[in-house]
C-alpha cells in the first residue's frame, strides 16, 4: 500500500491553510525568496505578540482593583458593567489572534516558505497594538496607582518569569541554530550568535537581581495579617449594611471599615458614594432626586430606601451563586445603616471601627462645619469602648481622648512616635517591604488597603504587614499559608537546575543542527564532484 500520495496531499492541505490564513494566498507561491519588508512586518507582529502577553498579564495583576474601576465608571456612565470581563474578552481575543499568526509565521520559517502577511492582517495587527498602547496610556494617566500594582506583581512573579523565559529561549534554539548554520553570511552568523548567547547569559544570571518577598525561610514568615472588613463583607452582602458587618464577624475579622456621612438633619449614616444611585433603589423611591448628594436627604427619607436589592441584581463580585436562599432574602431586606447601629454591633462583638468621614460638599448644609462634632458625640453617647475606635484624623480636627489615632500616610517613625501614633493606613502598593519592616522595628503597625486577591495577600503576609483592609475576608480566613513561598536555598537549587537543563538542551540542539548541516554540505560537495567527473 502506497502511503506517499495521501501524506503528500495532507501536507499540501496544511501548507495551503497556513499560507492562506497568514497571507491569504490559497495557491502555491513559486517564489521562495523572503523580502526584507515582510521580515520587518514579522518583527512588528512579534512585538505586538509580546505587548499582548504583557496586557494579559496586566489584566491578571489588576484583578485586585477592578471593583474600584467598576465603581468609578458607574459614576460616569450610570450603568453597572463588570469591566474585568470586558477587558478579559478583549485581551484574550487579541492574544489568540496574534498567537495564531506567530505560530503560522514560525511554520513558514521552518518550512522555508516565503513570508507574506496579507494587508488585512497587517491592519488588524496595527489596530490591536495601537489599542493596547492607548489603554496602557489611559491607565497611566487616569489610574496612576495601578502601575505600582503592576510593578509589585512583577517583583512577586519574577522567579516564574525567569523559568518561563528560560524555557522559551531554549525552545527557540532550534530555529535560531537552523538559521545560523544555514546562512552563508559570516557577519549574520557572528551577530546572531553573539546576540543569542548574550540573551541566554542574561537570563541565566537575572536571578541575582530578583528580590521577591516570598523567597523567605519558613521560620522568618510573619504571622497571618488580621483583617478589616472593607464596608463589611461586600462579597457576601450589600456593602455598608448591617448584614455586611455581621458577615464580617463570621469571617473573624478584627475591624469594621466604613464611610460615614451626615444626613440633612444631622444623623451619621454609612455610605461610600456621593449619591444613592449605585447602592439603593432611589430611582424608584425618589426618581427626581437620583443624582442628588446623599447629605441632602433627611434620615427619615434615607430610611425609605432599600439598600440590598441592587446587590442581587448587579452581583458585583459574582458571588450570589454561593449564597443560600436565606442569605439572598436577607440581603433584599437591608436598609441604609446608621453609625449608631454599627457602634452597637461593634460593642457587642468587640470589633474595632475605622471610618472615613465624608463631610457635606454643600456649604449651605446645616452641619457643614460641625459634622466632625456630630460624629464624635454619636460615638461618645454610645456604649462602645473608646479604645475600639481607630480614628483617622483630617487636617482640621484633633483625635478625641481615648481613641486610637491612625495616620493615613507614611511618615518617619520618629515623627509618628512623637505624635503617639502606632498605626498607619496606606494603599497596599504604596509601601515597600523594607518600610514595613522598618515600622515594625519601631512598634508601628501597618494596615494596607484594599486587598482582594490571594497573591496580594500572600505577598503582604511574606512582607510581615500587620493587617489588611479587604472585600474578601471569607477567602483569606481559609488561608493557612501564603499561596507560595520558598526558602532562598531551595530557590537557588531550582535556579541552578533550570539553567543547567537549559544549557545542556541548547548544546544538544546546536550539536544536532551543526552535524545535520555538515552532512548536508558533504553530500552537496560529493554531488558536485560526481557531476564534475560526469
Image (cartoon, helix red, strand yellow):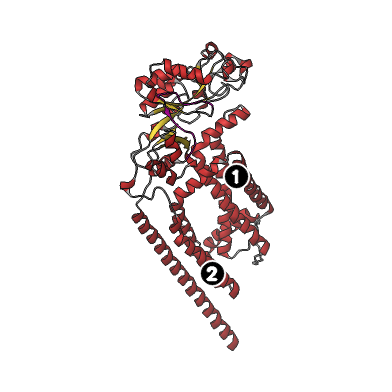
**Image: magenta residue range:** 396-411
Q: Nearer the viewer, residue 165 or 86?
A: 165
Mark carried by residue 194: 2
Toward the bottom, the furthest residue is 533
x then y, percent, for residue 120: 68, 50
Mark carried by residue 285: none
Q: Nearer the viewer, residue 409 or 179?
A: 409
Find out whether residue 398 is within the magenta segment: yes
Q: Quadrant of residue 142?
A: top right
- Cα distance, mark 2 to mark 1? 33 Å
Mark carried by residue 136: 1
Toward the left, the furthest residue is 219
Residue at the (59%, 18%) spot, across then down: 283
Is the C-beta separation of discs 2 and 1 under 8 Å?
A: no
Q: Mark 1 or mark 2, which is nearer the start of the sequence?
A: 1
Up-down relation of residue 75 to residue 217 (above or below): above
Amino acid at each position: 500500500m502506497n502511503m506517499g500520495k495521501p501524506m503528500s496531499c495532507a501536507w499540501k492541505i496544511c501548507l495551503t491553510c497556513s499560507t492562506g490564513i497568514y497571507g491569504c494566498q490559497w495557491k502555491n507561491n513559486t517564489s521562495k525568496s523572503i523580502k526584507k519588508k515582510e521580515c520587518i512586518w514579522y518583527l512588528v507582529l512579534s512585538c505586538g505578540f509580546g505587548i499582548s502577553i504583557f496586557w494579559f498579564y496586566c489584566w491578571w495583576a489588576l484583578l485586585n482593583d477592578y471593583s474600584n474601576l467598576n465603581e468609578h465608571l458607574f459614576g460616569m456612565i450610570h450603568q453597572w458593567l463588570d469591566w474585568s470581563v470586558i477587558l478579559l474578552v478583549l485581551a484574550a481575543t487579541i492574544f489568540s489572534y496574534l498567537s495564531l499568526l506567530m505560530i503560522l509565521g514560525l511554520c513558514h520559517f521552518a518550512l522555508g516558505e516565503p513570508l507574506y502577511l496579507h494587508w488585512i492582517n497587517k491592519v488588524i495587527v496595527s489596530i490591536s497594538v495601537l489599542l493596547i498602547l492607548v489603554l496602557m496610556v489611559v491607565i497611566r494617566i487616569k489610574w496612576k496607582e495601578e502601575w505600582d500594582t503592576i510593578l509589585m506583581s512583577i517583583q512577586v512573579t519574577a522567579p516564574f518569569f525567569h523559568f518561563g523565559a528560560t524555557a522559551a529561549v531554549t525552545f527557540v534554539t532550534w530555529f535560531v541554530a537552523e538559521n545560523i548554520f544555514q546562512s552563508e553570511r559570516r557577519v549574520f552568523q557572528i551577530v546572531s550568535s553573539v546576540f543569542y548567547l548574550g540573551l541566554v547569559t542574561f537570563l541565566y544570571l537575572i536571578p541575582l537581581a530578583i528580590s521577591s518577598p516570598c523567597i523567605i525561610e519558613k521560620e522568618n514568615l510573619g504571622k497571618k495579617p488580621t483583617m478589616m472588613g472593607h464596608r463589611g463583607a461586600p462579597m457576601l452582602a450589600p456593602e455598608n449594611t448591617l448584614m455586611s458587618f455581621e458577615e464580617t464577624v463570621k469571617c473573624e475579622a478584627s475591624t469594621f471599615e466604613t464611610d460615614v456621612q451626615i444626613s440633612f438633619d444631622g444623623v451619621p449614616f454609612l455610605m461610600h458614594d456621593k449619591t444613592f444611585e449605585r447602592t439603593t433603589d432611589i430611582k424608584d423611591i425618589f426618581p427626581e432626586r437620583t443624582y442628588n448628594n446623599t447629605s441632602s436627604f433627611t434620615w427619615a427619607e434615607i430610611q425609605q430606601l432599600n439598600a440590598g436589592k441592587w446587590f442581587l441584581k448587579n452581583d458585583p463580585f459574582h458571588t450570589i451563586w454561593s449564597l443560600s436562599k436565606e442569605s439572598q432574602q436577607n440581603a433584599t431586606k437591608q436598609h441604609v445603616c446608621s453609625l449608631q447601629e454599627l457602634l452597637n454591633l461593634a460593642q457587642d462583638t468587640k470589633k474595632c471601627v475605622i471610618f472615613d468621614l465624608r463631610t457635606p460638599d454643600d456649604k449651605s448644609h446645616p452641619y457643614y462645619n460641625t459634622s466632625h462634632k456630630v460624629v464624635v458625640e454619636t460615638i461618645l453617647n454610645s456604649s462602645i469602648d473608646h479604645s475600639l475606635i481607630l480614628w483617622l484624623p483630617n487636617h482640621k480636627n484633633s483625635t478625641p481622648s481615648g481613641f486610637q489615632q491612625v495616620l493615613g500616610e507614611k511618615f518617619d517613625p520618629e515623627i509618628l512616635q512623637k505624635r503617639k501614633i502606632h498605626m498607619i493606613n496606606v494603599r497596599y502598593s504604596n509601601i515597600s517591604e523594607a518600610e514595613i519592616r522598618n515600622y515594625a522595628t519601631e512598634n508601628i503597625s501597618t494596615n494596607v488597603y484594599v486587598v482582594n486577591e490571594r497573591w496580594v495577600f500572600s505577598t503582604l503576609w511574606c512582607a510581615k504587614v500587620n493587617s489588611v483592609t479587604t472585600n474578601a475576608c471569607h477567602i483569606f480566613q481559609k488561608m493557612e499559608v501564603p499561596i507560595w513561598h520558598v526558602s532562598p536555598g531551595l530557590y537557588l537549587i531550582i535556579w541552578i537546575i533550570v539553567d543547567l537543563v537549559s544549557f545542556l538542551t541548547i548544546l544538544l540542539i546546536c550539536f544536532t543542527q551543526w552535524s545535520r548541516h555538515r552532512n548536508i554540505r558533504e553530500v552537496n560537495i560529493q554531488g558536485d564532484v560526481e557531476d564534475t567527473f560526469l
